[in-house]
Amino acid sequence: MKKNLLFFDVALLLVAGLRTILVAQSAPATTAERAAIQRKLFEEGDTNHDRRLTEREFAVLVLRQQFNNADANRDGKVTRADYLANMSGTADSATIEREWKAMDPEGKGYIVPSDMMRDPIAIRDLKQQFKKLDKTGKGYVTLSDLQKLSR
């Protein structure tokens, strides 16, 4: 349940324009600041620059943010210890361990951002959250769609 909240927080951060998932950053005070952050985050996720955020782009954006939060020493790798510490309290230890094994099937002891796409639980949760954002079922959301949801 708490893990779903983490993913939903990222969806809300897109909607509200708040980068609250970045622990060190405080929430912007003005509507203009929130809109600017929302736009920047949307553009960061829109990797093909078509002004549409697809389910996959959304998943990559959220997982990249989660990875960055877990990468304690900013070396581009998340160790098992970093991951366990970051995920503590979001799910039971057996679920977290299953996720780790799905992302690190070779047993190398660390993951890189692309490995996070191997986590079936996270992908399932992200698909559900994207469906909540994509109210019309067209397979993508625009910045305008997200701005309408935040009003």
Image (tube, rainbow, N blue to C red):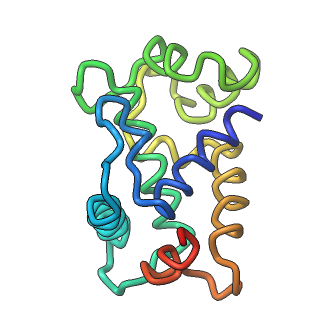
Judge by depth and name the residue closer to the eye, 131 or 56: 131
The percent position of residue 151, horizontal first and vertical second, equals 54, 72
Q: Please report the residue visible at 47 percent of the width from the left and 75 percent of the height from the top.
A: 147
Judge by depth and name the residue closer to the eye, 43 or 147: 147
Residue 39: image quadrant is bottom left
Judge by depth and name the residue closer to the eye, 149 or 94: 149
**Total residue callouts:** 0
Q: Does 73 sit left or right of 108 as displayed?
A: left
Image position of 99 with respect to 121: above or below: above
The percent position of residue 22, horizontal first and vertical second, equals 36, 37
Q: Please report the residue visible at 52 percent of the width from the left and 50 percent of the height from the top.
A: 10
The percent position of residue 55, horizontal first and vertical second, equals 57, 69
Image position of 46 with respect to 91: above or below: below
Quadrant where the N terminus lies? top right
Q: Does 34 sit left or right of 115 as displayed?
A: left
Q: Please report the residue visible at 38 percent of the width from the left and 47 percent of the height from the top.
A: 19
The percent position of residue 61, horizontal first and vertical second, equals 42, 56
Q: Please report the residue visible at 55 percent of the width from the left and 81 percent of the height from the top.
A: 140
Residue 138: image quadrant is bottom right
Image position of 81 with respect to 108: above or below: above
Q: Does 68 sit left or right of 59 as displayed?
A: left
The residue most toward the front is 30
